[in-house]
Structures are given as C-alpha cells and as structure tokens.
Amino acid sequence: MTAATDPSDKEDSQAYLPDFCAASALFIIVLVAELVAITLTLAAHNAPGMFLIELSKTSFFILWIALLGTALMCQLRGRLENAGKTRAFVISFIILELMCLVVAEASWQLTRIFGQSLIIDDAHTPFILRTFAISAIVIALAMRYLYISSEWRRSIVLEAQSRISALQAVIRPHFLFNSMNTIASLTRTNPRQAEEAVEDLSDLLRANLGGSGNRSTLKQEFETAAIYQRIEKLRLGDRLTVRWDIGDLPMRARIPSLTIQPLLENAIYHGIELLPEGGEVTVLGKSIGDTLEISISNPVAIGKERDKEGNKMAMSNIRQRFELAFGSKASVSVDDRDDRFTVSLRFPADESKQ
C-alpha cells in the first residue's frame, strides 16, 4: 500500500512548481512577458508613431523582471517545494514581488542618473506603485494558474494510479479457468509440470496483484510476460510460438508497470487463439539513440474477432500511462493493416528510479 501511494505524494509535493531551469519554461515565460508588454503599451494611449518606441522600453523593463524572476525561481525551486504548497505560493509571491520593486527602483534611479539614456516618464512614487500593482496582479494570476495546473495534474496521477490498480486486479476469467483446467489435467499426466505451472501462475498473480510502484524495469516486464507465455504454452502447445528479439534493449530501462504482459495477452487472446493452426507472436525491441522501441505483433484471423472493448481499454490505459510518464517523448501506435496486428511503443531510455 505504501508503494502505491509514494508516487502520488511525490507528485503532489512537486507538480505545482515547473522546472524554471528548463528551456521550454523559459520560452513560455519570455513569450508571456512580451504579451504583457504589448498589452500595457496598447493600453497606454501613446502618441501616433511612438508605439514601437514605447513597446521597446516596456519590453526591456518587463523582460528583465521575467528573466531575473526565472533565475531566482530556478535556484529556489527545491527549497520552496520542501516548504509545502501553501507556503511555497506565499513565499514565491513575496520574493517575486520584492524583486519587481527592486528592479523598478533601480530602473528609476538609473533614469535619474543617466538622463536620456533610459527614459521613464512617471514620477518616482507613481512608477513604483504602478509597477507594484501590475506585477502583483500578474504574479497572482500566475500563482493561481500553477495551483490549478497542479490540481489538474494530481487528478490525472490519481486516475492513472486507479487505472493501474484496476489493471492489476483484472485478469481475464477465461485465462484463470483455462489455466486451472490445464493444471488439473497435468496433475494426472505430468505432476512435475503441473507443479511448475502452479508456481508460474502464482508468480504471475503476484506480479499482477502486488506490483510495486508505477514503473518497473524492462527485465521485470519481460520476465512477467515470459511467465504468462509458459502458462499459455501448456494449453496451446505447438499452436503458440513467441519470438523474442530484444537483445539490444537495456534491461534496466524503466517503463510503466504491467505494459508488456497485457499486450502479449491481447496478442494471444485476439490473434493466436482464433487461428486453428495457431501462429507466431513477435516481440521486437531496438534502441535508437536515446529512444527505445518495442513492437508486439500477432497474426489476425480474417473474418473472426472477439469483442474489442477489452483490447481498446488496455490500449487506452497504456497510452495514458505512457503520456503521464514520458509526455510527448513517448508514443503508442497501432498498425492493423493486412493480416497482422502490431502495437509499437516508443519511449526514452530512462534508467532512473521513479
């Protein structure tokens, strides 16, 4: 139970502050700062022909504030997150507001000292007060956005975890019935093999019902899938062949848990079982730079198909968890052309523990 809640706790404590050191975050901040500068310049009712001049002055001032604020938050993010969500918001607001006032005061003093080099038309007090009011509104809106974004992300995390729990708890009844029937028949003909099958079924149930964390290594995923393959092989015999070509994959790379085994199960249930002569499921893996690709392909019985709702639910589940784990860096695609059904997974080669 603890392992299931740890990731959410981590997400809850860190999701509300973005990585201000990232280039993508810096780009968004600069873009928003420039939009604010354009808005303020348009609202100032400048004389005709002065718009670009006023925009350049306003942009210069606001971009300095935005860049300095980003640098501060980049350095302080870790400490702020450790303070808790509410305190982080309050402390961030105060720090950013004080920084805005310091920059405003420095700008006005530089204008007074250098004269025409830097031009601020307002008197000292109105300029400081106007900067304080505008920055307070913008920072407050940004803090509110971050709060809403963190709650939205937290809800996605909780939903994904509930989906993982559901996936761990759901094993197709037909698989259990077939496995138990196979084991029962083996107890009379091959007791040793029956005992091995019971152990395999126990290991598979443990992996499905007692998985720890949101991610596991590729080695663990392939071991679980191999256990499932052995159990199905006892029932289907020569009708089932699985070709594994995964030697190029780093086995320590991490992937959302319970990904490979459900895909192999779908390949057998929706493909091999419907073919009287059986067929071959291929599991291919390759490394392309920092990206890993795994494809699982099975033959399709033309004119025969089972209810696809279970398959669609599994694919939707895996897509959501991959998006949550890797964002736009990962993809889950399906190729349902001709006489084969192929699911391809692409994701970063991440070996860090999550």
Image (tube, grey):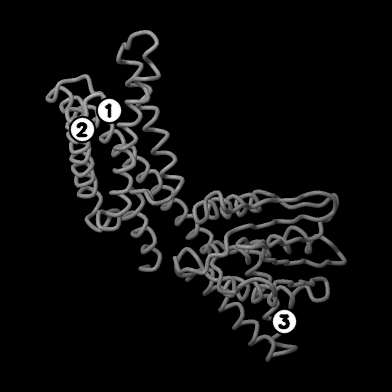
Extreme residue in the bottom direction: 192
Left or right position of 149 against 174: left
- In the rendered structure, which amino acid carries the disc numbered 1? Ser
Q: Which residue is mark 2?
A: 110
Left or right position of 162 against 280: left
Q: Tell me which label, 2 or 3, sits earlier in the chain.
A: 2
Which of the pair 231/89 is nearer the observer?
Answer: 89
Q: Secondary structure at mark 3?
A: helix
Q: How much space separates mark 1 and mark 2, taking CA atoms? A: 9 Å
- Residue at 83 percent of width and 67 percent of height: 278
From the top left corner, tell me how far across and down residue 129 is, in percent: 15, 26
Mark 1 in CB contact with mark 2 (< 8 angstroms): yes
Q: How much space separates mark 2 and mark 3, taking CA atoms? A: 91 Å
Density class for disc 2 (Cα within 10 Å; few <14, some 14-19, many ≥20) is some
From the top left corner, tell me how far across and down residue 214 is, in percent: 47, 63
Q: Tell me which label, 1 or 3, sits earlier in the chain.
A: 1
Q: Which residue is mark 3?
A: 185
Dividing the picture into quadrants, the one containing residue 237 is bottom right
- Nearest to viewer (mark 1 / mark 3): 1
- In the rendered structure, which amino acid carries the disc numbered 3? Ser
- Residue at 77 percent of width and 59 percent of height: 271
